[in-house]
């Protein structure tokens, strides 16, 4: 789950949630529909998805090459990721 918060015009905290789930048997990542909104929130996001494997996606360093890049616009999307390492 990704959560972001912001303030509306009345200075009331508003939240956005994006559910994320992984299905191991199907090798699919589901990024669910965004719920909530607030002024100034990001309308689009880019997710760099990395499958963790030996020497890939581990440690403290940023992995240079994502296995998949997903441009997210707030709608539910499913991405199939096949292990290739």
Image: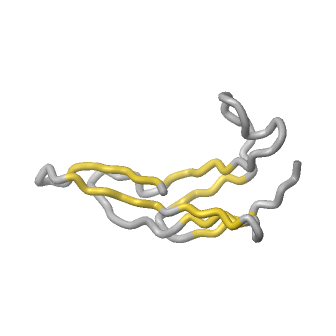
- Find residue 43 and report its image quarter: bottom left
- Number of on-image labels: 0
Q: Is residue 9 left or right of residue 81?
A: left
Q: Is residue 51 left or right of residue 74?
A: right
Is the image coloured rainbow, by chain, by secondary structure, or in one colour?
secondary structure
**Residue ranking furthest to the front:** 25
Q: Position of residue 12 (x, y in %)?
A: 16, 53
Q: Position of residue 71 (x, y in %)?
A: 58, 57
Q: Nearer the viewer, residue 70 or 19?
A: 19
Q: Is residue 76 left or right of residue 7?
A: right
Q: Nearer the viewer, residue 3 or 45?
A: 3
Give the residue at x 72% y 45%. Answer: 66
Image vertical order of residue 38 relative to residue 32, above or below: above
Give the residue at x 14% y 49%. Answer: 11
Q: Nearer the viewer, residue 72 or 2?
A: 2
Q: Position of residue 37 (x, y in %)?
A: 31, 61
Q: Nearer the viewer, residue 25 or 34?
A: 25
Give the residue at x 82% y 60%. Answer: 82
**Residue ranking furthest to the right:** 85
- Find residue 38 and report its image quarter: bottom left
Give the residue at x 74% y 50%. Answer: 51
**Residue ranking furthest to the top:** 61
Q: Is residue 32 left or right of residue 39?
A: right
Q: Position of residue 45 (x, y in %)?
A: 51, 53
Image vertical order of residue 33 relative to residue 7, above or below: below
């Amino acid at each position: 789950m990704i959560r972001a918060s912001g303030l509306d015009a009345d200075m009331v905290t508003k939240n956005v949630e994006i559910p994320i789930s992984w299905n191991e048997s199907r090798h699919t990542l589901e990024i669910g529909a965004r719920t909530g909104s607030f002024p100034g929130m990001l309308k689009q996001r880019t997710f760099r998805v990395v499958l963790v494997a030996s020497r890939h996606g581990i440690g403290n360093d940023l992995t240079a090459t994502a296995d998949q890049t997903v441009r997210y616009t707030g709608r539910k999307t499913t991405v199939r990721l096949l292990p290739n390492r």
